[in-house]
Image: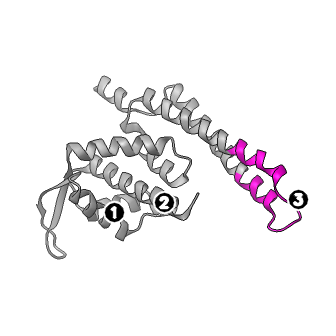
Amino acid sequence: MTSSDRKEFAMSAVRLLVLGVMRLRQPTHGYAVRRELLSWRAETWTNVKPGSIYHALKQLTHEGKLSPFGTQDSDQGPGRTLFQMTEAGEAEFRRLMDEALVSVDMEELGAGIAFMDALPRAHVIEKLREQRRRSEEVCTSLLTMIPDFPGRYEAPHATDLLELWSGVFENLSGWTEAVLTRLEAGEYRMSDQVQADPN
């Protein structure tokens, strides 16, 4: 994975997190989105920083995925602009969720898992099965590369590195399997359950 790939995954994760919080709390303002993500300690499992949150809000508004919805008075300075999601914003949220749930990038996948209850159970199961398949494929491809690399004690320790990364993806596949088992057993309250169950 290149540095530009990682940057793109990080940007997708921030956009998804901002849209997901906006969807839960709308209409709301940037500071409230930031406060919500801080309460989740999102900075420990993503690259989300205050500047990236406000940049995403500005970009999403420019793209027509968020729209201003008045101003909220503040005792600590000028009023804060409230935003709400548009239809285009909802479509972008769904698109980013589908990408995140099949991703083998931890940050992007984590953002998708944070909001997986916004989607129907069968849809999330389908996407996570695809994610598990991808993880297994990456793990296998890394292991099959080992014979073509220098020996374990030769620089730059390619065998050790390939084993390290294959282990990461093997672990990710096992973690995904555990989440799938819980979803298939009916755990978690998903969007289709909320609509069907008024209690």
Q: Is residue 163 visible?
A: yes
Please state which of the two labelled residues, at mark 1 or mark 3, is closer to the viewer: 3
**Residue picked out by circle 3:** 151
Q: Is residue 19 left or right of residue 162?
A: left
On the image, the x and y values in percent for residue 172 come to 63, 45
**Where 185 sits versus 95, above or below?**
above
Q: Is 85 in the magenta?
A: no
Image quadrant occupied by the C terminus? top left
Callout 1: SS: helix
Q: At x 35% / y 27%, what residue is drawn?
A: 192
Q: At x 82% / y 52%, what residue is drawn?
A: 148
- The part of the image, by quadrant, that contains residue 79 is bottom left
| The one of 10 and 145 positioned closer to us in this rendering | 145
Distance between the alpha carbons at the discs numbered 1 and 3: 50 Å
N-terminal of the pair, mark 3 or mark 2, is 2
Callout 3: SS: loop
Q: Which residues are drawn in magenta?
A: 139-165
Residue type at mark 1 is Arg
Q: At x 16% / y 63%, what residue is drawn?
A: 81
Q: Tag 2: Cα neighbours inside 10 Å, few (<14), some, or many (≥20)?
A: some
What is the residue that sits farthest to the front in this orientation? 148
On the image, the x and y values in percent for residue 3 come to 54, 64
Q: Is residue 179 left or right of residue 198?
A: right
Callout 2: SS: loop
Q: Tag 3: Cα neighbours inside 10 Å, few (<14), some, or many (≥20)?
A: some
**Residue picked out by circle 2:** 46
Residue type at mark 3 is Gly
**Where 72 sits versus 144, above or below?**
below
N-terminal of the pair, mark 1 or mark 3, is 1
